[in-house]
Amino acid sequence: MDTTLQKTALITGASKGLGLALATALAQKGWKLLINARNAERLYKVQQELLKYTEVEAISGDVIDEIHLLQFPDRIAKWGGLDLIVNNASSLGMSPQPHLLDYPIEVIHTVFHTNVIAPLSLLQKVKNYLKSNAKIISVSSDAGVEAYAGWGAYGASKAALEHLSHILAVENPQWKVYWVDPGDMRTDMHQAAFPTEDISDRPLPEKSVPGFMELIEGNHPSGRYVSQQLIADLMMVR
Ligand SMILES: NC(=O)c1ccc[n+]([C@@H]2O[C@H](COP(=O)([O-])OP(=O)(O)OC[C@H]3O[C@@H](n4cnc5c(N)ncnc54)[C@H](OP(=O)(O)O)[C@@H]3O)[C@@H](O)[C@H]2O)c1
């Protein structure tokens, strides 16, 4: 492959769930990847698996750790630019989720740091490497729009992530900025959100991937998208 044409992506939280599904889909299409997650062993295994398809760099660490985030630009500097950032790593907060009046404030700090401040901090650190037509995808949730009891910390953080993304889109028309509801997915985070429920009827994260690929490969304007709606629209066109 001509490496000057190779597309490049940074995906946070790519060791399982939706992040892994997206990383796998992009790797299979030959994208060069930089991935992260906290659990180094699991991340390393994912890196080894994806190396079958493409070039993959992995840095383990917590997105709320500024020293960790500062390592990203050095890795990307060698690449000659970044086409895509997927802010996927996220904190649900406590499981089960308490109502707001009983929610420990220190946990709310971590939820907002992980879900809102870290994506912005990462973007600040790598902004000089983003190509002029780069895409920034922040994974949100319907909980960022709907008011579900018990979802106050996580939901409010996703609402903040959505508004922050909207403002980034207005301030940076050279990039496409998407904030995306992936829908319910059978993942560890979903199980933590519904600790007493059998979640085996929820779709696997791979089912959400085509909606994200439509945004990544298409020419949609910046804005809020629902992955399942994008997929339904695609089916109508075919
Ligand atoms: N699952 C759903 O039903 C659902 C619905 C709506 C929206 N979402 C959103 O979809 C995205 C993916 O969620 P998921 O369900 O796929 O979650 P998941 O299966 O729990 O995977 C989360 C990934 O992020 C990593 N991660 C978590 N916290 C991190 C941190 N502080 N720093 C670095 N990496 C971190 C995890 O690895 P480590 O634990 O090793 O760090 C893992 O790779 C999230 O933004 C979530 O809010 C999910």
Image (tube, rainbow, N blue to C red):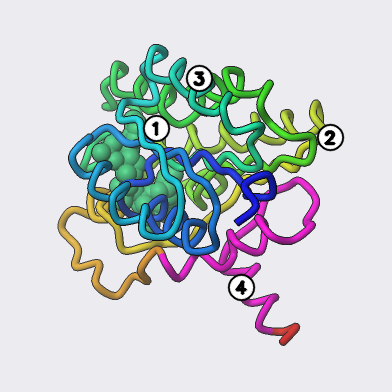
Closer to the camera in the image, 71 or 229: 71
Q: Amino acid at mark 4?
A: Ile
Q: Which mark is residue 132?
A: none
Separation of disc 3 and disc 2 at Cα?
26 Å
Tell whether circle 3 marks a residue whose Cβ is less than 8 angstroms from ligand 1. no
On residue 231, the disc is 4
Percent position of residue 199, x then y = 25, 67
Judge: label 4 CB < 8 Å from ligand 1: no
Whether disc 2's CB lies below 8 Å from ligand 1 is answered: no
Q: Residue furthest bottom?
A: 238
Image quarter of residue 112: top left
Query: What residue sits right under mark 3 in the picture?
Result: 74
Magenta stretch, overall SS: helix
Which of discs 3 and 2 lies nearer the camera? The answer is 3
Q: Is residue 101 visible?
A: yes
Q: Are marks 4 and 3 in contact (CB under 8 Å)?
A: no
Q: Sequence-wise, which precedes: disc 4 or disc 3?
A: 3
Amino acid type shown at disc 2: Pro
Q: Which mark is residue 153?
A: 1
**What residue sits right under mark 2 in the picture?**
173
Of residues 102 and 91, the one nearer the viewer is 91
How dense is the environment of label 3, judged by Cα within 10 Å: few (below 14), some, or many (20 and up)? few
